[in-house]
Amino acid sequence: MSKSDACLIWIRKAGGLIAAIAVLSVAPRAFAADIKVAVAANFSDTARDLAAAFQKKTGHTVTMTFGSSGNFLSQIEQGAPFEVFLSADAERPVKLEAEGLGIRGTRFVYAYGTLVLWSATPGFVDNKGAVLARGQFEHLSIADPAAAPYGVAAVETMKKLGLYDTLSPKIVKGTSIAQAYTFVNSGSAELGFIALSQVYKFPRGSVWYVPKDDYTPIDQQAILLKPGESDPAAKAYLDFLKSPEAVKIIKSYGYEVK
């Protein structure tokens, strides 16, 4: 074999090796999936951080839609192509599981939420919530109880305090807990019941942590939905939510994880 032939063979082998290395280096990204997730509004910022960490770890992307749990239930029942549902309660995932739209055995609590009374004005809300009984405000913002578990918790709290009938004329309802927060943040309402996670990382204004005994526990459950049943990436996302890395992120927003 001449030197020129041997050199040509070596070049071909080297080229094949380089090509193989190139294929291996892009393989994880080439097979990366995009997971469609319906996310309860209170969990928006947390979910964004989780999605970034999940993508960095797996290459999979997460396309999220944020809203109230009640509205998502209706959309999923009507055929919305979400693969995973992160609800703000247990009721909706349990219902979807019973209807066969959620995959049995995949449902779990990913976070326990906390209700707070918040005002963007420092000193307006005291640390015992006595501001409610004084009633020296025009508007009290809550999420619509028909669609949002945090709205249900707000109503339960006011009834427990014996103030619901008195405060009812002052209540303004947001379509989700995100809108309830916006009403207070913009000054449209002087104060409102919101999720702790919305003010935990960047505290400002004044806040009262509502005693847990004043409302039904907010057990936020996740479930794999029918469109994601055969998607390994969707299952990997749910597994990731249980990982130490994800739990650390979730806790950093004031949620409890057991």
Image (spheres, grey):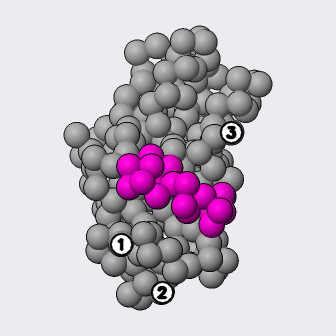
Q: Which residues are magenta?
A: 153-174
Cα distance in 3D space between marks 1 and 3 = 33 Å
Q: Nearer the viewer, residue 71 or 125?
A: 125
* Residue 154 lies in the magenta stretch: yes
Q: Nearer the viewer, residue 30 or 23?
A: 30
Q: Position of residue 80 (x, y in %)?
A: 73, 30
- Which amino acid, by three-letter code, is at mark 2? Thr
- Label placed on residue 121: 2
Residue underneath mark 3 = 71
> Residue at position x 37%, y 45% from top?
215
* Residue 124 lies in the magenta stretch: no
From the viewer's perspective, tell me whether residue 57 is left or right of residue 154.
left
> Residue at position x 22%, y 40% from top?
258
For the residue labelled by badge 3, is the local secondary structure a helix, a strand or a loop? helix
- Which amino acid, by three-letter code, is at mark 1? Ala
Tell which circle, 1 or 3, labels the residue nearer the N-terminal end.
Answer: 3
- Give above or below for 223 relative to 255: above
